[in-house]
Amino acid sequence: MSGRLHRYVSQRSTPRRLLVFFTLAQILIYYDRGLIAGFISHIQEDFRISDTLAGVLGSGFIFGFTVAAPVFAHLSKHYSPYKLMSIGLFIWCGACVLCGMSYEYWVLLLARIITGVGEASFAGTFVQLVL
Amino acid sequence: MLFFRSGLAPACLDDLAPDKERTTWLAIFYSAIPVGGALGYVGGGLVAKWSWHAGFLIEGLAALPFAFLAFFVKRNILERQSDIVAPVASSRSKMAEAEAVASGESQGVDQASDAVPAMEMNEVRAGAYDMSDISLDAESAPPPSSGVAAADIAATAGSVITTTRIQITQGNQP
C-alpha cells in the first residue's frame, strides 16, 4: 500500500507541481503568522492577560523556530528532506489543533512554540535540500 | 550564477526549475510570503468574530494533506539521477570528452572536487533535469541490451561528472 502510494506520488511530482506544492505550503505557513495577529485581541479578552503576555504569545513561535531550524537543517543532510518536511508539517498540524483546543494561556503558548518547530522543518530543509 | 547558487536561495527550486524560468519560479515562491501573511490577517480578523479556536483547528486540518503528500514524495534527485543519466550521457559524451581534453586540467580537478561537492552535484542534476519528463517512465523501459552498452553508459556518465568539475574549478578561480 505504502509502496504504491510512493510510486503514485513520485511519478506525478513534476517540478511544476512541486513548485505549486511548496508555494501553497508556504502560503499556509505565513497565513499562520498573520492569523495570530488577527486573533490576539480576542485571545487577550478571553484569557484576561496583560499586553506583555499577549506580545509573547504573538512572537512565541520564534522560540521554537530558532531552536529547531538548525537541528532540521543538520538532519536534512542525513535524512530525506521531504520526509523531514512531512514530519515537521505533521508536528505543525498537531500544534495547530492543540492551539485550537487550548483554554489555558500556557497551553496556547506551548502550542505556538511547537508550531515554530514545525515551521522550522519547512524553512530549514527547504534551503538545505541541495546542500 | 555560481555565486547565486551557492547562497542561501531556496536551492531546491533553483535546482528543479528550467534555466529560463528559474527567476520566475523563485518570484512565485517568494510571493507566497506576503500573500500568506495578508490572508492570515484578513482570515484572522474574519474568523475571530466567530471563534478563534475554530480558526486554528481549520488551519491545522488544511495543512494535513500537505504533510501526507510531502511524506510520499520520493523525488530525491540523487536517486532519480541513476535513471536519468543514461539517455543524457550518451548524447553528451563526445562534447564532454572534447572539453575535458581541451581544458587539460585533470590534475587540478581532484583537489578542487573535495572543496565543492555540493556544487558539482548541482551541475550534474541541472544537466540531468532536461530529461526528467521522459525518465518518469524509465522504470518501464527495457534495460541496456548488452554488457558493452552498460559499460559505455558508465564511462560516459563519469566523463560528464568530470567535465562539470572542471567547469567549477575554472569558475571559482579568480
Image (spheres, rainbow, N blue to C red):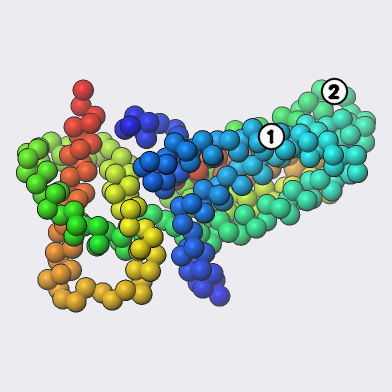
Amino acid, disc 1: Gly
Residue pictured at 45% horizontal, 44% vertical:
B13
Residue at image x 55%, y 35%?
B30
Percent coordinates x, y for residue B27 in the rendering: 51, 35
Q: Image quadrant for the N terminus of chain B?
A: top left
Q: Nearer the viewer, residue B83 or B131?
A: B131
Q: Secondary structure at mark 2?
A: helix
| Mark 1 residue element | helix
Q: Is residue A21 above or below residue B72?
A: above
Q: CA distance from mark 2 to mark 1?
A: 22 Å
The answer to whether one can see residue B121 in this image is no
**Image quadrant where residue B132 sits:** bottom left
- Which of the 4 image quarters holds residue B131? bottom left
Chain containing the residue with disc 1: B
* Residue mark closest to the camera, 2 vs 1: 1
Task: Identify residue type, mark 2.
Answer: Asp
Q: Is there one chain holding both mark 2 and mark 1?
A: no
Seen at 37% across and 35% down, the residue is B5
Q: Which chain does the numbered disc 2 sit on?
A: A
- The numbered disc on residue A51 is 2
> Would you say residue A12 is visible in this rendering?
yes
Image side of residue B67 versus residue A104, left or right: left
Residue at point 72% right, 38% down? B39
Numbered badge on residue B37: 1
Q: Is residue B138 left or right of residue A58?
A: left
Q: Residues within 10 Å of mark 1 (few under 14, many from 20)?
A: many
Mark 2 crowd level (few <14, some 14–19, many ≥20, 10 Å Cα)? few
